[in-house]
Amino acid sequence: MKFKTAIKPYHAAAGGLGSLEATTRFVIDSKNALKNMRNLLRMNKARGFDCPGCAWGDDNKSTFSFCENGAKAVTWEATRRQIDATFFAQHSVTALNRQSDYFLEYQGRLTEPLRYNPQTDHYEPVSWDDALAMIGEHIKAMDNPNQLELYTSGRASNESSWLFQLFGRMVGTNNFPDCSNMCHEASGAGLKRSIGVGKGTIHLADFEKADAIFVFGQNPGTNHPRMLHSLRHAADRGARIVTFNTLRERGLERFADPQKPLEVVTPMAGTISSAYYQPNLGGDMAAVRGMAKALLETQRQRLANGEASIFDDAFIAQHTHGIEDWFAQIDATDWQTIEQQSGLKQQQLREAAAIWQNAKRVICTWAMGITQHKHSLNTVREITNLQLLGGHLGKPGAGLCPVRGHSNVQGNRTMGIDEKPPVALLDSLARHFNFEPPREHGHHTVEAISAMLRDEVKVLLALGGNLAAAAPDTPRTCEALRRCGLTVYISTKLNRSHLMPGKQSLILPTLGRTEEDMQASGRQFITVEDSFSMVHASEGIGKPLAATQRSETAIVAGIAHATLGSEKVDWLALAGDYNLIRDHIAATIPGFQNFNVRCEEPGGFWLGNAAADLRFNTPSGKAEFCAAALPLSVCPETQAPFVLQTLRSHDQYNTTIYGLDDRYRGVYGQRDVLFMHPEDIRALGLNDGDRVDIETQSTDGVQRRVEAFRLVAYDIPRGNLAAYYPETNPLVPLTRFGDGTGTPTSKSIPVMITAAHVRENQRIA
């Protein structure tokens, strides 16, 4: 496939006509236009299906409850293209490995179970019975239960993920690496330490009441576009939107609502951010510390003058612990350190602090720009400190809002996909099913990959996802997958992981979120949880492409039955009626009482949040201020001249590449690009458009290098770089991960840049 490559600035607002044009193009390209138009009208609606893209909440008000990237997710899944035995007979695994990620998924839907034949280097059809029997035999032949790894993608439903964790614990392991380990682990861990709950505290409706919204480290225009509607409405009524983001992103500047005809056909658009600050990568903790220092100086001056406090002293006294230690840490942090690490001027941070001070109701929201650094856990806690200072918890229009990635990544964790399971969950499972689950902690994703490299993993079961493309240190991750005794991938489409087969490998084709799920008791629905702890029913409406595709829930149940039989659990009965699964969830997971009945509630039901009710499950019984020092350096073991972050393009969701354009950043038909400040380009003696090699500076003796990336001059602070993943995942060391999280430091990679030595005819004009 050939694509026209270009770098040309995009001057329009986010959304608007450009979004409608892109949506229309993807609907037509799916070769299933009428079906997908119907799908989009039923997405995020009662008795429809929940978006398979991001985890942003549903407002239940809009006529069209989808965004451009949600439409891409639906049309990408509900395509008429399909690949079968003929395709795999024509393409060896080695040949497919030479293709791009875009090519692999563009071929269409998987429709029949496949088994890798290492003698021919081809995948070949296998019956469901033989595939499930093979999995059961491999698991039963393991020397110990911890030779099993159970990986989970954030797209898996509550029902399938709950079944998955029950199966794993009945086998005897807590090895549940998942996509959350690689993205938002710092949010859950940091919030749990500060407020006792590892989730956000607000409702979607709180965006309609906030006086100020602080947006840290996220790009909603690409990653969760429906958030732009909430921000736009808040800005239109006078709320101050304050953005801290290293790159200048169009979606955080201007947004034209595609659902407003006048904004589609005219240049009209609404301003999103009233203040936009561009900190250094990893400098957000220092930026928030600077705001707090400015506020503390103002507070002391006001009190000395006999004026009223700017803090919520009653809230602090009644509901928090440890503020004096934090104040001492603030005093010990000088402005020079704050400015150097944040990359922002003292005056800028005082301006941001003044906006916070003058707002009665503040929301702080963040995403992976905050959570993929070595000190991310403390950054999340520093943001929480700021909110506690003003009592911005437990009241309308205020709170903490981590914006999760995939559509049910938060629900997976609620269902027990956790390598460090709460004791209460294990006790509940033990009582309800009369067995003793394992108590020792299992592997998170990086630990699982390391165990594979040590030949300690006999079986990898992957419930969705694309671990080879999502995980760091790509060559080592791919080697790890190949060293497994058996790899099993439950997937809708072909992806990079399938091309890294273990000694034996299976691909099991599953239904998508958009498709009708018929089981023994009739048509089924599943549930998901969004970023606001709302649980929604989701019911697919499209006919599956093939009778040989099975639902995720049915596949997990089939594996469990083939491995464990039906003595303790009738797995096949659960697969035949998801209401039975939800009854078990209601009996074992807090907040899900009367689950099946509550699924009928319009718009879903709220799980509740103890911290939002000012009940804090911490050692002190109060919200804990964190008195952590700023890190000495974002990349403490190196003195690299540049820090690189990996990020998504606009035609991408997680590892799924829908196309080769990044419209808002002005990149078309290509992905091997490196965003750099124009003065940094000149200082290297290079020009915009030149090709460069990127090499990680590390201390483990491993060379990590990608080559021939095209320089793109961009509005980004000097010394900071950005490039797309998975192309730059080879640069992220497995050995560098967040303190207390295990999350790879994909937003702070120390790198060196050198001119690439490529033939002239390899350059892209």
Image (cartoon, helix red, strand yellow):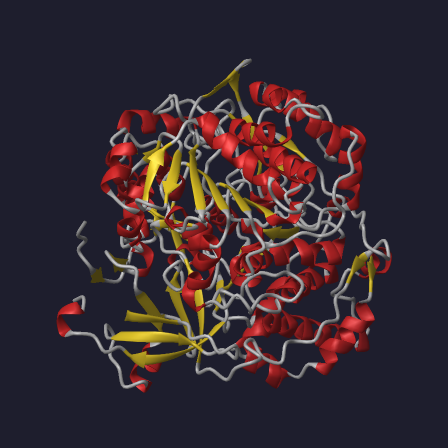
Above-or-below relation of 58 to 418: above
Residue 69 figure quarter: top left
- Residue 408 vertical position relative to residue 625 in the rendered view, above or below: above
- The residue located at (83%, 58%) in the rendering is 314
> Which quarter of the picture shows residue 755?
bottom left
Residue 679, image quadrant: bottom left
Q: Is residue 302 left or right of residue 138?
A: right
Front one among 747 and 698 = 698
Q: Can you give x and y, in whole percent of width and height, for residue 93 in the image?
A: 31, 48
Query: For this view, does 302 lie left or right of residue 340?
Result: right
Query: Residue 179, percent across and down?
Result: 54, 50
Residue at horizontal 61 percent and vertical 47 percent from the top: 176
Viewer-closest of 103 and 252: 103
- The residue sitting at 52% across, 24% down in the picture is 46
748 lies above or below 651: below
Left or right? Give the position of 260 relative to 743: left
Instruction: Name which residue lies at 45% across and 25% down.
Output: 540
Q: In the picture, which quadrant includes the C terminus?
A: bottom left
